[in-house]
Image: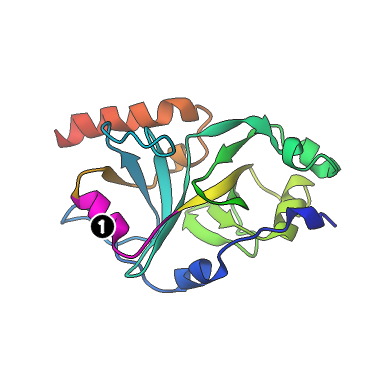
């Protein structure tokens, strides 16, 4: 039963999602559990340049997320050639971030919450459970779309706050049109253009 899809994840990070996060953004922006980080054009790090990151938690001790706009040139079957169900996922695997590159997370669009998952925004759910991933790929649960990420993004205590204070990230509310965009290669520039219109 799809045992090779074991999701090796940092469990204590996801357990911490049960607590209320604090978002450091514009002074009038309400705290939320899901938001987007948009890399400043001056960010040159190869893993994060021109990136858009969905952040699921931003708390006193840590923040985690997945990069939404970096599809890799490989399909899921490349990593799991012995799993027939992997052939059913006809979309590239996305680069989620530099941490735990052997961990797989997935973002689901569904009107009802598949369990176990974490709520992102309305009708969007983040999962790490291998059995749920198998069922989703095998069409055993009803959903509109699924996207799989390899690795994730994480920051040490105080690191993200420092990066924001140094102007490395813009913060935007998470919107449904970005989460599973059919044109991820255009996402960063589209959001930068929006920021330039609205903020500058």
Where does the C terminus fall, quadrant-wise? top left
Quarter location, residue 127 = bottom right
Residue where numbered disc 1 is placed: 161
Residue 141 seen = no
User: What's the colour scheme?
Assistant: rainbow
Percent from the top left, x then y, of residue 48? 40, 39
Mark 1: which secondary structure?
Answer: helix
Quarter location, residue 193 = top left
Number of callouts in the render? 1
Percent from the top left, x then y, of residue 149? 58, 45
Where does the N terminus fall, quadrant-wise? bottom right
Image point (45%, 53%), residue name: 65
Percent from the top left, x then y, of residue 42? 26, 32
Is 122 in the magenta? no
Image point (47%, 35%), residue name: 69
Q: Residues within 10 Å of mark 1 (few under 14, many from 20)?
A: some
Name the foreground residue: 75 vs 134.
Answer: 75
- Part of the protein shown in magenta: 154-165
Name the foreground residue: 184 vs 145.
Answer: 184
- Horizontal side of 182 relative to 49 (left or right) equals right
Name the foreground residue: 110 vs 101.
Answer: 101
């Amino acid at each position: 039963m799809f045992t090779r899809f074991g999701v090796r994840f940092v469990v204590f990070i996801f357990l911490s999602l049960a607590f209320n996060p604090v978002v450091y953004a514009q002074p009038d922006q309400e705290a939320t559990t899901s938001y987007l980080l948009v890399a400043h054009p001056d960010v040159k790090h190869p893993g994060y340049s021109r990136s858009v990151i969905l952040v699921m938690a931003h708390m006193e001790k840590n923040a985690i997320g997945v990069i939404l706009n970096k599809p890799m040139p490989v399909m899921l079957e490349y990593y799991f050639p012995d799993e027939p169900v992997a052939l059913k996922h006809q979309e590239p695997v996305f680069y989620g971030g530099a941490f735990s590159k052997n961990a797989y997370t997935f973002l689901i669009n569904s009107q009802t919450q598949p369990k176990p998952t974490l709520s992102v925004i309305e009708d969007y759910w983040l999962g790490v459970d291998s059995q749920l991933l198998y069922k989703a790929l095998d069409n055993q649960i009803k959903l509109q779309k699924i996207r799989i990420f390899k690795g994730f993004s994480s920051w040490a205590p105080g690191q993200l706050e420092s990066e924001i204070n140094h102007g490395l990230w813009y913060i935007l509310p998470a919107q449904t049109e970005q989460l599973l965009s059919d044109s991820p290669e255009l996402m960063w520039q589209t959001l930068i253009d929006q920021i330039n219109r609205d903020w500058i």
